[in-house]
Amino acid sequence: MIHISEYSHNTRNQMKSFRLISCPIFLNGVGVHMNYYLKYMLKTVIFFFIMTILIFITVRLMPASPVDMLLQHLSLPPTEANRRELIVEYGLDKNIVSQYGIWMKHILSGSFGNSLLSNTSIGEEMMRRLPYSFGLGMGSLVLSIILSFFLGYGASLKKNGFIDVFTRFLSIFTLSFPSFIVALIIIYVFSIKIPLFKFYSGNPFWGLFFATLLLVFYQSANLTRVARTAFVTMQEKTYVKAYLMRGFPLSYVLLHHCYKPVLYSILSASISKFSTVIGGSVVLEFAFFIPGISYFLISSIMSRDYTVIQAYLVILFIWMYLVHFIVDLLLRFLKGRDA
Amino acid sequence: MKRFVLLANMLLLLVIAIIIQEIPLDVTIHLNEAFKNFSTVNIFGTDNLGRDVFSLALSGGLRTWEAVVIASSISFIVGSLLGLTSGYFEGLLGEIIKSLVDLVMIVPSLISALIVTAFLGINPVTAGIALGLFGIGTYMNQANHLTIREKEKEYVQISHLLGVPWYIIVYRRIYKNILPELFVNLGNTASHVVLSYAALTFIGLGSDFVRPDWGAMLYEYRNYIVLRPTLLIVPSLCIFWTSLSIHLFFDSKHS
């Protein structure tokens, strides 16, 4: 079972629905546990093959022919002889099953085939770009989880206090104001008005820095509300009330004895937010000119480079599964002690 | 809050209607009238090509709303029907539906919409369909959980005993009962579509630059951020207000 679920805005619902899925497996002991992971792996592999077949077919259903695009790119006339030449060179004359087989072989060897336009290995190109995107995605995810934990903690301590009102305002703001406009404002202020940083000089460091900051800002605003709701529900628990009666301050009890359930609900909310992290990073990579894989995707779509689009989708699939798997493991760990 | 948003939007529509009566919409290019200031003729001034920014913003708004309506109705209807079916038939059929939806959900909706609109050309219909289809997961999961919960209730059991056919139980009785809870997500989805559509047109793959969109306006005018910041402020505020009012209107927590 995978939790790729995007849960409702209502956080209580969120926790409830999550418990519904993951509880019974844990109560059954280690044997079922191993069985569960075997099943998970098997399902992932089957999914992977279905996904690659779907991608393969979809790309072949695209309206523009890659051969014509390539001829146009090489500024050659689209004559029948030229077309034939290219079709034979790229192996497009073979039947579709063996084409799929060749592509599969390329994927499994990690080279992902060659780019249609530049004729270089896509795998190498992706590996060069992956650290930027990976740093942006994972860095902002981890930072926003940490930040939202403490902000939610602060907000729950004092209802309608400064942090509470501020984070409520932030969450409404981030839900209704696109991040790329904020990116434009940042570029305007920090690069033109006050020329502190250079964004387009070829060194992507500052672009990456501000993109991560923006993603953290956008993610944590939402997650903070989740954390706050979780902390407030914890305050109703009997054991917390017992601590309070014995004279422990609320701030101490919440931080030392309630962190696991809260982390659980933040993580389960963030797992569903992860696809928006990737989606958001596409726009920000474009706005800040970060040479990540999403920027590569956009430039490849512009030049109709089908092989890169295929490879991107496969890498995205692997990445999403990896993140879900890791977060799932963490959730199981947190749940195990507490359930 | 709900009443306030509704009232503000009604007033806004009224003002726009009065203005359109006086000055008809005109998005054609007048190169000799570029970069005009705010005036009674061009309420928000004109852009680098001499187009009236007010008219551009309004027609961009219409296109945005088109995308919002298409995308959210597809996500809502398809997602909740699939969720109801998979929740009611929990066995093999449910698993198959859930796996298919998982496949759709693993690709972020913005990226899939980016690829689809790049090849088919970007307009409210293609963007709306792509964003809608790849956003069904939320509703499917929620409807699935709610249906599993409702199935245990007495009215469903009694309907079974009375011999009511399954499709009436699922699509009429259970659906009616979980509808209010499904609506909670609608504001979230719709305001998300506004932002996604703006992002798609901002990146602008396969876009038609004659047709105005808020995101495309932002991308075109980003060079004039120093010279004429108002050109960027108008579409930004449009996106912000639309998304905010959708969010506040549908969000039950703030009302």
Image (tube, helix red, strand yellow):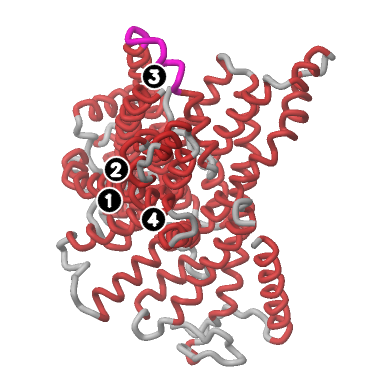
Q: Is B71 or B164 nearer to us in this picture?
A: B164
Please state the horizontal and vertical placement of residue B156, each as a whole percent of the image.
Answer: 75, 21
Q: Are marks 4 and 3 on the same chain?
A: yes
| Quadrant of the frame with the N terminus of chain B | bottom right
Which numbered disc flags the more N-terminal residue, 1 or 3?
Answer: 3
Instruction: Residue under label 4, please give it.
Output: A218
Q: Secondary structure at mark 2?
A: helix
CA distance separating discs 3 and 2: 26 Å
Please tell me which residue lies in front, A27 or B44.
A27
Q: CA distance from mark 4 to mark 2?
A: 29 Å
Which badge, 2 or 1, is on the more N-terminal residue? 1
- Per the rendered image, the range of residues in magenta is A22-32
Q: CA distance from mark 1 to mark 3?
A: 30 Å
Q: CA distance from mark 2 to mark 1?
A: 8 Å
- Label 4: state its secondary structure: helix
Q: Which amino acid type is marked by label 4?
A: Tyr
- Which residue matches tag 3? A43
Q: Is residue A278 visible?
A: no
Q: Nearer the viewer, mark 2 or mark 1?
A: 1
Mark 4 or 2, which is nearer the eye? 4
**Residue at 73% across / 33% down in the picture?**
B177
Q: Are marks 2 and 1 in contact (CB under 8 Å)?
A: yes
Residue under label 2: A308
Q: How many marks?
A: 4
Query: Disc 1 marks which amino acid?
Result: Phe
Q: Which mark is residue A296?
A: 1
